[in-house]
């Protein structure tokens, strides 16, 4: 889920492509305007599907596209969209949470 100042985007679990929506990276992409999205989302679903039919990818399989993207990055010397750097930062946050719970104090993630 991505929370922004103008709205929210979230994705349903991964599913297979259909003729109507040939691209399903991480499932059905949904979008809702900030003022329409209640804090308690159990009440109603304000999200509208995003049209992904015009997105051109080599395959309807998210796994195949990920491998092709990785191969392209190696060939061209580019960093992948999802790199190990993202995972390291995620681990810092998790370690910070555990350390904060253990010590009862705020943790500066820059020090981890």
Image: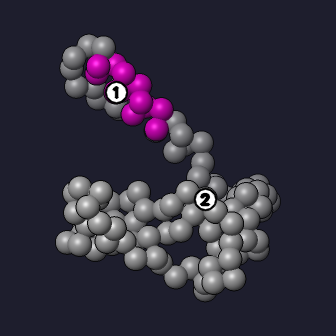
Q: Which residue is mark 2?
A: 14
Residue 88 is covered by the magenta coloring: no
Residue 98 drawn at (x, y percent): 36, 21
How packed mark 2 is, by other alpha carbons closer than 10 Å (few <14, some 14-19, many 20 or more), is some
Q: CA distance from mark 2 to mark 1?
A: 28 Å
For residue 33, what is the image quadrant?
A: bottom left
Residue 106 drawn at (x, y percent): 22, 25
Identify the magenta region. 90-101
Q: Which mark is residue 97?
A: 1
Q: Is residue 25 above or below residue 56?
A: above
Residue 20 drawn at (x, y percent): 63, 84
Residue 94 is covered by the magenta coloring: yes
Pick the front one: 64 or 83? 64
Q: Is the stretch drawn in magenta largely helix, strand or loop?
A: helix
Residue 30 drawn at (x, y percent): 44, 70
- Name the image quarter holding the C terminus: top left
Q: Which mark is residue 79?
A: none
Residue 49 visible to an observer of this rendering: yes
Residue at position x 35%, y 26% in the image: 96
């Amino acid at each position: 889920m991505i929370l922004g100042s103008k709205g929210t985007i979230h994705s349903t679990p991964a599913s297979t492509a259909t003729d109507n929506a040939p691209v399903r990276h991480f499932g059905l992409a949904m979008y809702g305007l900030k003022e329409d999205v209640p804090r308690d989302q159990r009440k109603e679903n304000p999200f509208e599907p995003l049209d992904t039919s015009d997105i051109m990818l080599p395959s309807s399989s998210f796994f195949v596209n990920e491998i092709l993207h990785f191969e392209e990055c190696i060939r061209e010397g580019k960093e992948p969209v999802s790199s190990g750097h993202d995972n390291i930062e995620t681990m810092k946050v998790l370690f910070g949470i555990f350390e904060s719970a253990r010590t009862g104090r705020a943790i500066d993630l820059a020090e981890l």
